[in-house]
Image (cartoon, rainbow, N blue to C red):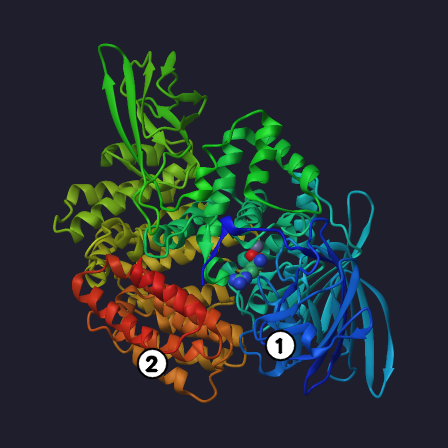
Amino acid sequence: HTIYLKDYTPSPYRIVSVDLDFRILTENTRARAQLTVEPRDDTAPGTPLVLDGDGLVLGSIAIDGAPLVLSAYAANDDGLTVFEPPLRRFVLETEVTLQPETNTKLMGLYRSSGTWCTQCEPEGFRRITYYLDRPDNLAVFKVRMTAPLDVAPVLLANGNLVDKGDAGDGMHYAVWEDPFPKPAYLFALVAGDLGSITDSFITGSGRKVDLGIYCTHGKEDQCLWAMDSLKRSMAWDERRFGLEYDLDVFNIVAVSDFNFGAMENKGLNIFNDKLVFAKPDTATDGDYDGIERVIAHEYFHNWTGNRVTCRDWFQLCLKEGLTVYRDQEFTSDERSRAVKRISDVATLRRAQFPEDGGPLAHPPRPDQFREINNFYTTTVYEKGAEIVRMLATLLGEAGFRKGMDLYFERHDGEATTIEAFLAAFADANGVNLDQFKTWYLQAGTPKLTVNEHYDADRQTYTLKLTQETQPTPGQPNKQALVLPIKFGLLGPNGSPMGWSEVSGAEVRDDLIVLNSAMAEVTFTGIANRPVASLLRGFSAPVVLESQSSQQDQLFLARHDSDPFNRWQALQDVGMALAVAAVKGTPWSDASVTALSEALAETLGSETLDDAFKALALNIPDEQSIGREIATDIDPDKIHAVRGKLLHAVFEPLAMQLLATYNALASTTPYAPDALSTGRRSLRNRMLGLLLASEAAGADMLAAQQYGNATNMTDRMAALASSTYAGTPQVAGMLADFRTRFGGDPLVLDKWLAVTAAAPRDGVIEDMKAILADPSFPKTNPNRLRSLVGTFAMNNPTQFARADGAGFRFVAEFVTEVDKINPQVAARVLTGFRIWPMLDSTRRDAAKGALAALQATALSRNVADILTRMVGG
Ligand code: ARG
Ligand code: ZN
């Protein structure tokens, strides 16, 4: 059934403290909970205490030490009800026996490669014990764990270690106490035979924090980058936001079976090991980046998420959007702000825009859900971060900081809401954010249309701005949003142009604030027709539609002071050519030449950095082109047209591409810093472009790079671009890769992903063979996602095959995996969200596969996605 935000009510009872006692054995785990419960002041006598439980079997139950009679309570698969608890503080004691060994959903207590670990967000704690499993119940936790010393010498939980010792019979115990009241979703424990690296951090106020990263024995040397990232994150949060760490210990554990990236449990973050392990010959620059980003993200949650948490799960983006914004800022400060912004926007467009424009669209703060796990989405995370970024743009850095400070001052130790968050910013700055709040409530990507008019006689320049948001499922009518539009006017020589007056909307320096459906902004004292650079830095998450000519765009690509818009201008030119060609209007030689020249100039620039050039020297990917076309998409046609365009644009540059490729060769040892990463990404882009433009010998060059590479970044880049291009050497390279790294599961994932993304017939048969191999680990989320997740999201031509084979393959996979792990199944299924945009043959094929899936027994996770997908 559906849960609505409007139905939120506080619980009649509160659990104020929790004593947990786990007896961990190889055959099962016994969990005893002593919950100190209090009724609220206004709780009526006889109000039942209703605790959540998921699949638990009650062993014993007592209140204040006295066992309850059978008629005093009821326990079933969804929980436990005590009919008439005392109307005073009391201790409820329950005992259950858990089977972590067979917990393939990976929620609650489970076992990953022998290690016991937990995942509780959002509703996993109820799979461990009966509880008020809702984020507005904050309690202090004390956890005792007893386990066999040989299989589990390491025993970890939240907070500080207060006791440990021998428990006899080959068992030992540890007791952990977390002084900070927290919701149950932040609970964690780990027990296993793990190696570790340790370090320490001294906070600004002089507190020494012991840092530990735990992992499978033998991988310790692969945790150093994660540790380095952690220390830099801790320092950054003090510098930028004045936020210090608050416990004496901060531990991270890497596990190999994990449903998503990582989890911010208080003082004990648990990570998917792919976001911890890195060494140059097995991890790419992208992996190093991801580790730094997610280590920072989870650490930053200690304040935005843990110290101040969410009242209910509708408020998820309160912690996630804000924390993504914070991790983006961290990366921007540590590396290149422009490059970070461009890649974040590319991610937003690739992942969030299709969600927002498809059947699964929902507001960043949804007001209803059937399955909360399906709302850990790019809309909640990435669009949530864009909203916080707009707030920072509107208030300025100092105003934003004032708002953050007031937010913590008011809400530290609380579970709160988006309303309270916005009120802190409004009150700290004396502004009204009522209309701004609509961003959280409304789904869909607004379209911002700009028409310009220059009046030479009056020397005025007018921008007519219109915003419109299309209906989304359940939201037929849309409100006007507050759009912060950063901009600049460029004069004929490319330098900034001023104006004497401006009217028609709120304009401050470099910012237009559009808060109505339409506005005409007129600048006076404009001596020549300017070229407007609009939405600088992508200051609002909208689709910008302007009439600007190719000439104006290339002018901006050369002269704009905003690096984001220089990049954007080049992409826009490529996009226009590709879209027109797909729609039947071939490009002119002149327009392709103009783009080639601008790209050559960008590549040759002495001032632009390598990482930026690598992003700029490209044509929008197939999915972006598809989204721009939006209806009746034929992915094969897009693939073919894009290939021809790459060829036409980059073939004339072959000499320069090769020269750059050679000049960027390096013999210094691998380092993951921004400069070296940028150099590698540009060099590998050169290789990719040489392959795409079918330059003579490019396939050999790629095979050589593959064979001679001294790090995974270069090896993988050669393999991936050869696979995309389908060179004759690919089969040999893939076979080599498989044997060379066969023993390392994270490298196997790379092989699976590159295999699944190949745009060629036969890929489905190959994947079926891989899945049918008895040695393939059918329960590991990373393996499954690398293969089938990549296929559904990243192989547009084969997934959306006109004969429906791709759709059927994924639908059948979802049916199977749903029985093991519904979260993984539901996530892979979202790949179907593009179906309404496809041509009618493919649409019908997709609908057929979804209908067949609907006819089988499904988890709530998959059923929810499916209903929204076909019904919406
Ligand atoms: N809070 C975690 C993070 O953002 C992710 C938890 C994801 N949970 C889920 N059910 N998908 O870092
Ligand atoms: Zn998060």
Label 1 lies in ligand 1 vicinity (Cβ under 8 Å)? no
- How far across and down, in percent of the image, does residue 500 sit? 38, 11
- Numbered mark located on residue 687 in the image: none
* Amino acid at pointer 1: Leu
Against 619, residue 721 (above or below) is below
Say which of marks 2 and 1 sits in front: 1
Tags 2 and 1 in contact by the CB under 8 Å rule?
A: no
Q: Residue at x 36, y 69 (%)?
A: 791
Quadrant position of residue 248:
bottom right
Q: Is residue 304 visible?
A: yes
- How far across and down, in percent of the image, does residue 68 sit? 75, 75
* Amino acid at pointer 2: Asp
Quadrant of the image where one finds ligand 2: bottom right
Quadrant position of residue 96:
bottom right
- Numbered mark located on residue 766 in the image: 2
Tell me the element at label 1: loop
Say which residue label 1 marks: 56
Q: Residue at x 56, y 65 (%)?
A: 280
Q: Rate crowding at label 2 as few (under 14), some (14 to 19) or many (20 or more) other CA atoms within 10 Å.
A: few
